[in-house]
Image (cartoon, grey):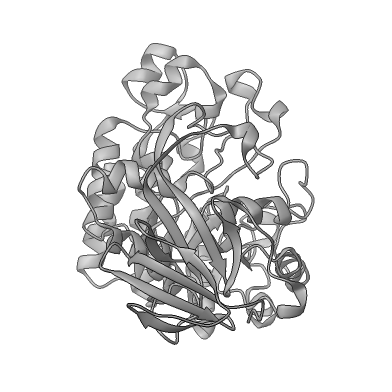
Amino acid sequence: MSTTGSYLIKGARIAGGDAADLLVENGFISAAGTSLSAAGATVVDADGLIALPGLVDLHTHLREPGREDAETVETGTRAAALGGFTAVHAMANSSPVADTAGVVEQVHTLGRQAGWAEVRPVGAVTVGLAGERLAELGAMADSRAGVRVFSDDGMCVWDPVLMRRALEYVKAFDGVIAQHAQEPRLTEGAQMNEGAVSAVLGMTGWPAVAEESIIARDVLLAQHVDSRLHICHVSTAGSVEIIRWAKQRGIKVTAEVTPHHLWLTDELVRSYDPVFKVNPPLRTNDDVLALRAGLADGTIDVIGTDHAPHPSEAKECEWAQAAMGMTGLETALSVLQHTMVDTGLIGWSDVARITSARPARIGRLAHQGQPLAAGSAANITLVDPAARWTVDPAAMATKGRNSPFAGRELPGRVVATFFKGHPTVLEGTLNSPLPAEAE
């Protein structure tokens, strides 16, 4: 834990509730209450700010090793800190793929060296993401990285026998399989959501059933083997209904939705701007409304950013040749406020649940997502809900400039991020990483 000083956070509204003071010492919240004082502590004036447990992202693409032209662990976790995140799960589709204990330990070490946020590697389900044979799941779980989440994200584990074996295997160490739900035979050559807009534009459509059929199959497999399944980036109304059905039957399924799928629709593809090309594709307004309702009622458990930075040449090209993906770490909380909080669908206590407590529980990070109370680890995010800012990709910490919110004015701004008691962000700007000697 950090031993880099003590901080007295004065007058923050804890998860949107009553104002209170938080005393941070030696990496923990040592006291919480009103009218606190502490000799020698650095005072942080949080009047009007909301204090949340540090945000946890289950779905981040840090690209390293091998794709450092798009992102590195250093730049990605800087972006995470600015977005209020104190932990991110790094997806396995690096080069080489994170399908061995050696690669996940490398990513874990890079995260510790960077010091901006906790980095938990996600292990691949299959060797090379090829969907042919299981990767070293047990070895990755037993490694120093302590992997508990496994995913071939970017690719679907399409073989039902292999998916069943993976679900059975991870039960031994309380792991979870995070599925990228995309039936490959139904999406071959697909460029955007299949619907009225794709028909007008003449683009090959990506049908909702390609996602929904895999989710339906996998929740039944999870029920059959009594194992944990997580659904990545849910994007259709039908998917929400299937997950709701599964939860009603006690199946161990959790799900995430991205910030961009809570707001943007396939109507934006009419611009032919590749910044709006993403996997799964932007869907219809009816899907957006269903996703918001599913997040509000708990059917969808968490926000997952699916932060997917690309070098400019991969996006500044013809639509058909452009890479799929959007950046998201630095805009996620603001988009969530715009789509869910300011619309009255959820409150700030719900934000704490879906951005911190629940993803920490799914990822088995016991020291993250804790309520802001005496004795808890001091992973804290301070947000100014009244602030407004305009998204400028060139000013972001991520290497990726492919933000779909470029030029938009968003509500809410992260003012400070405390990681293990150390302020990585202060007054809305990067401060310093957690010193290596404090690990």
* The N terminus lies in quadrant: bottom right
Q: With respect to residue 162, does 375 lie above or below?
A: below
Give x and y (percent) for residue 108: 70, 69
**At 42% from the left edge and 50% from the top edge, which residue is drawn?**
333
Give x and y (percent) for residue 369: 44, 72
Asked whether residue 153 appears in the rendered view, the answer is no
**Along the horizontal axis of the image, is 216 left or right of 437?**
left
Q: With respect to residue 351, does 238 lie above or below?
A: above
**At 62% from the left edge and 64% from the top edge, which residue is drawn?**
117
Residue found farthest to the front: 39
**Along the horizontal axis of the image, is 423 left or right of 222?**
right
**At 52% from the left edge and 48% from the top edge, which residue is drawn?**
306
* Residue 151 occupies quadrant: bottom right
Towards the viewer: 317 or 124 = 317
**Along the horizontal axis of the image, is 2 left or right of 17?**
right
Asked whether residue 78 appears in the rendered view, the answer is yes
* The C terminus lies in quadrant: bottom right
**At 78% from the left edge and 71% from the top edge, which residue is drawn?**
102
**Along the horizontal axis of the image, is 354 left or right of 342?**
right
* Residue 33 occupies quadrant: bottom left
How many marks the image carries: the answer is 0
Give x and y (percent) for residue 409: 42, 31
Towards the viewer: 147 or 349 = 349
Towards the viewer: 326 or 250 = 326
